[in-house]
Amino acid sequence: MRLKLNILIFLLLIRIVVYSQYSITVEFADKKLKNSSIGSFELRGILYASVNDFCNLFGYHTFYNAESQKLEVKINNHKIKFTANNDFVIVTDEKGELGVIQLENKTVFASYSFFIPIKKLVNLFSNVTGQSIQYDVKRNKIDVGIFYEKKKYDIFGIMYDVKVNGTMIRLMSNKRLKDYDSWVRYEPGDKDKKNGWLYLTIADAKADVEKLKSVKPAGIVKELLMFPSANSVQFTFKLNQKISNTEILQDSESNDLILAIYTPLEEKLPEKELKPYEKNIIREKERWKLDVVVIDPGHGGKDPGAIGVTGTKEKDITLAVAKKLGKIIEMRMPDVKVVYTRQSDEFVELYRRGQIANQANGKLFISLHCNSTSRKPSSAKGFEIYLLRPGKTEHALKIAERENSVIQFESDYEKRYQELTEENFILLTMAQSAYMKYSEHFAELSSNFVQKHTDLEINGVKQAGFYVLVGASMPNVLVEMGYISNREDEKFLKSEKGQNKIAEALFHAIQQYKIDYDQSIEGLKQIGAKE
């Protein structure tokens, strides 16, 4: 008993020391509030800051529920909810509309205070309050600037971020921008297309023209012209060199709109000006960039897969969604090649699917399936996504067993899979550990976007030992789109509307994943920095 008490006291002392060891200075530009500091600590190379201290500094009202270990913060008409040991933050606005922000690391509860990574803290409160809040790493200070005119303008800021392969323009917005269009125009005599104009029109939005034009353009952008009207605003960017592609993206963590302008790499960094090691770096980055997505429609041919309540065949749904998803990628991401493991009602062995992906130099492997239970109809329903690891739960093991059972349709399957013992399977999954953080990231994005774009129940990210994922030497996931043994899910999955919604959701996940993945290759973002 005495030993347990001593250990408890020691742990409490550690928590207090960790909390008080570091502090971050907070400076206010308008001097209405006194400069102060908030508690912080560093864990695994990541700096965490106290949400409670930050709220107390600004006088925000907070409510702590000790039983559920939740913290609710009220700021004007917004509510922000933090949960201990959870990597999601819930934000609701005055209309009751819900927003879910995923942290890179879980919220830490220590010394009666909630801590989140400092970068997330400043971004979150800046977006909610409309106030300029930035963290300076070198000075270890949070700079609090003036309030933006949130009520007057929807688009209140612009940032130019110069990359090796182009320029990213971030339009900071107070609301979600849903209706926009862009195109590029060149002068008739510009044969080399080195002096184009990029037009971006955003409907139902007002922009702070004076403020945005005061920001000096950078990178590819030589000049910015703006033409506001009663119902829209047009951005006209004068370009100073040839571009290869443009892309409009929604930031997953804010209302910001990101306009990505890509240049041919050889024009940005001519080979003759590069040192040998720089050439190698560029070559490696080119080799690893996300340029091939492999879509694997599960089952096919003599293998129908699961059979639904009304006779729907899994193989038909997976192929239909795969084709819809592939078509969207080809239309909206022309720089990404789509490879299918099958494009018709044919039987393709599990081992062959991995071979197809590897031979195509795939960078992401998505295996599409429909879930089912032995009993029909069943109450089990919802979307879930699996990673390649030995199954943890009986449910996951049963799913893997059902999907893996298709090897019985293969000739000589006993000989081919005899080496895949439990021990060897674990070794194979360990060999894929280099891709796991990317697989996890894509799985989380997929789950989030499916929740956003469909009414399917979300059962989360799980793990199990699927043979089809073993051979794919790249980030990979197995998607169970829903239960065709459930009448509601089956109706949704076999409908054109339902298939389009799932394809659209998965496309958005791929699109966001490509941004994060490419940034991780450039060293601008870390994927998978989890506890």
Image (cartoon, helix red, strand yellow):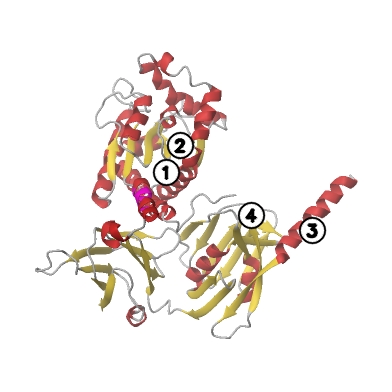
Task: Look at mark 1 in the image and give the residue it sits on.
Answer: 456
Q: Are marks 4 and 2 in contact (CB under 8 Å)?
A: no
Residue 232 in view of the camera = no
Q: The N terminus appears in which quarter of the rendering?
A: top right
Magenta stretch holds residue 158:
no
Element carrying mark 3: helix
Which residue is rendered at x = 54% and y = 58% of the image? 89
The Cα atoms of the two marked residues, 4 and 3, are separated by 20 Å
Q: Which residue lies most toward the right here?
A: 2
Which residue is rendered at x = 32% and y = 48% of the image? 504
Q: Is residue 43 left or right of residue 94?
A: right
Which residue is rendered at x = 25% and y = 47% of the image? 330
Which residue is rendered at x = 50% and y = 63% of the image? 92
Q: Are marks 1 and 2 in contact (CB under 8 Å)?
A: yes
The kind of residue tagged 1 is: Leu
Q: Is residue 190 left or right of residue 180?
A: left
Task: Look at mark 3 in the image and give the residue it sits on.
Answer: 13
User: Which of the 4 image quarters holds residue 221?
Assistant: bottom left
Magenta span of residues:
282-286
Looking at the image, tell me whether mark 4 or mark 2 is earlier in sequence order: 4
Task: Look at mark 2 in the image and give the residue it sits on.
Answer: 381
Element carrying mark 4: loop
Task: Look at mark 4 in the image and give the residue it sits on.
Answer: 84
Looking at the image, tell me whether mark 3 or mark 1 is earlier in sequence order: 3
Q: Nearer the viewer, mark 4 or mark 3?
A: 3
Magenta stretch holds residue 284:
yes
Label 4, residues with CA under 10 Å away: few <14, some 14-19, many ≥20: some
